[in-house]
Amino acid sequence: MAALTRSHVAAMVDHTLLKPEATAADVTALIGEARELGVLAVCVSPSMLPIRANGLVTAAVVGFPSGKHHSLVKGAEARLAVDQGADEIDMVIDVGAAITGDYNAVLADILTVREAMGPAATLKVILETAALSDEAIVECSRAAVRAGANFVKTSTGFHPAGGATVEAVALMARTVGPRIGVKASGGIRTTEAALAMIDAGATRLGLSGTRTVLAALPD
């Protein structure tokens, strides 16, 4: 793979702030830093909306971080977030349903959110891959494609099992092919880790330590 520049990687980044203690001032600082770094998007909790993103893509999480919210609640949360200016929704599936192999329930969950939020906004589906078997990752990725999602995403970054891995990203990329994107997120703290995710097939990165990751890249 040819060496990626700082601007190339920045254009793939959702600059993320999802800490429970985040304040409106923290979100304002996030947006300022995002503009300075030249990233694509900012990703925030839905309670922080609406925000003045100043030309950046605005993403909000739904059913976060457990995924155990009722599908109708996830759908309502997604619809409200879009109404308040979110361009993209990052929803968490019911991880327990995935673990037990109830992939029809996973599909229905994603469909409910997709239909509630409407066709215009981008939908990313968080699988929490560190908690899943390879089979579950494959089947949930397929469900995301069938439900009309635009991305599958590895992790919330809050699960004790861990975050993104190169192996999970590669498996997701092989499963969804060119049909939808793959977002690697959770525990990506170094330039080397970010590049490894991209090399494995990630087309978007969720980062909180964006400045550190971008700093070692060439202009």
Image (cartoon, grey):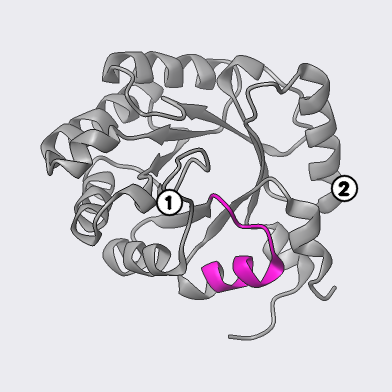
Query: CA gap, disc 1 to disc 2?
Result: 27 Å
Instruction: Using the image as rendered, state which of residue 4 and residue 196 is in the foreground.
Output: 196
Amino acid type at image mark 1: Thr
Q: How packed is label 1: few (under 14 Cα within 10 Å), some, or many (20 or more)?
A: many
Query: Residue 59: percent from the left, percent from the top?
Result: 58, 34
Q: Position of residue 162 (x, y in %)?
A: 46, 50
Viewer-closest of 46 and 185 = 185
Question: Would you place residue 168 above or below residue 32 in this image?
Answer: below
Q: Earlier in the sequence, mark 1 or mark 2?
A: 2
Asked whether residue 66 appears in the rendered view, the answer is yes
Specify the quadrant that holds the N terminus.
bottom right
Q: Nearer the viewer, residue 168 or 42?
A: 168
Mark 1 lies on a secondary structure that is loop
What's drawn in magenta, residue-wise?
Answer: 186-197
**In which image quadrant can residue 50 be found?**
top right
Amino acid type assigned to the residue bearing label 2 in the image: Glu
Residue 125, magenta (yes or no): no
Q: Which residue is mark 1?
A: 154
| Residue 208 position by quadrant | top right
- Is residue 49 at least partly visible in the picture? no
Find disc 2 in the rendering and name its residue: 36
| Picture coordinates of residue 18, whole percent (x, y) | 62, 31
Tell me the residue at 72%/21% (across/down). Answer: 51
What quarter of the picture does the C terminus occupy?
bottom right
Which quarter of the picture shows residue 48?
A: top right
Outermost residue toward the bottom in this view: 2
